């Protein structure tokens, strides 16, 4: 039986986007595409409940693996924060949205950003057993990623000369290394 990885892509991404990498490593994929109805039409609270149910049913165990991207990482953190017990498995967040994002004249703040920030600042966030953050040097969330990695005791990998949208081959390599490291 193949192990299953839970994959939570960002907005506009599909679960199948990195399926080649997962299948080469002998992993099945489950996950949720967050930009498609009915999920995208659900309230934020309902989205967190749906993800919590997904994760508990598929990968809530010591050998569980979650890979998330961009806004999918934000939803994941909100989901993990809603639990009393820390996630017992491993998490890789790629270009995570971690709160307010400011770019030149634009600013965007996801729901419950202040609650997440306070949980991180006060060290009450239930940190996963093991986590890594992969982020570009010019990503608007780099400073938040540094702070979050300290709070979560995460391994932080900063990709030079890249922003929020990391190069596909770089991401494939990072996913492969993360999954191989975790399975050895």
Image (spheres, helix red, strand yellow):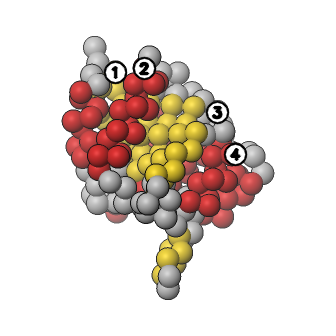
Q: Which residue is mark 1?
A: 3
Q: Position of residue 80 (x, y in %)?
A: 56, 42
Q: Secondary structure at mark 1?
A: strand
Of the image marks 4 and 2, the number of the one nearer the N terminus: 4
Mark 4 or 3, nearer chain start: 3
Q: Nearer the viewer, mark 2 or mark 1?
A: 2
Q: Are marks 2 and 1 in contact (CB under 8 Å)?
A: yes
Cβ atoms at labels 4 and 1 below 8 Å apart: no
- Marks 1, 3: nearer the viewer: 1
Between circles 4 and 3, the one closer to the viewer is: 4
Q: Are marks 1 and 3 in contact (CB under 8 Å)?
A: no
Point 46% across, 24% down: residue: 182
The answer, for residue 169, to whether it is visible in the render is: yes
Describe residue 115's horizontal placement relative to residue 172 as left or right.
Answer: right
Seen from this angle, which residue lies furthest front? 161
The span from disc 4 to disc 1 (Cα, nearest Å) is 29 Å
Q: Closer to the N terminus: mark 4 or mark 1?
A: 1
Under tag 2, what secondary structure? helix
Q: Nearer the viewer, residue 166 or 82?
A: 166
- Write down the residue under mark 2: 183
Q: Nearer the viewer, mark 4 or mark 1?
A: 4
Q: CA distance from mark 2 to mark 3?
A: 23 Å
Mark sitting earlier along the chain (1/3): 1
Please name which of the two marks, 2 or 3, marks the residue nearer to the observer. Answer: 2
Residue to which mark 4 is pinned: 151
To which residue does mark 3 refer? 85
**Cα distance between the residues tagged 2 and 1:** 10 Å
Residue 127: name its quadrant.
top right
């Amino acid at each position: 039986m193949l192990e299953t990885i839970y994959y939570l892509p960002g907005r506009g991404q599909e679960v199948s986007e990195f399926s080649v990498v997962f299948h080469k490593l002998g992993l099945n994929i489950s996950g949720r595409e967050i930009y498609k109805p009915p999920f995208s039409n659900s309230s934020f609270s309902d989205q967190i409940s749906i993800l919590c149910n997904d994760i508990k049913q598929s990968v809530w165990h010591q050998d569980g693996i979650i890979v998330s991207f961009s806004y999918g990482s934000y939803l994941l953190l909100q989901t993990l924060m809603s639990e009393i017990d820390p996630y017992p498995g491993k998490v890789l967040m790629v270009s995570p949205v971690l709160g307010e994002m400011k770019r030149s004249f634009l600013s965007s703040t996801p729901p419950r950003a202040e609650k997440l920030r306070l949980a991180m600042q006060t060290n009450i966030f239930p940190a996963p057993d093991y986590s890594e953050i992969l982020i570009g040097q010019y990503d608007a969330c780099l400073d938040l990623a540094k702070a979050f990695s300290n709070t979560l005791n995460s391994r932080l990998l900063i990709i030079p000369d890249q922003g929020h949208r990391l190069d596909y081959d770089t991401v494939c390599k990072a996913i492969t290394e993360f999954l191989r490291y975790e399975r050895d």
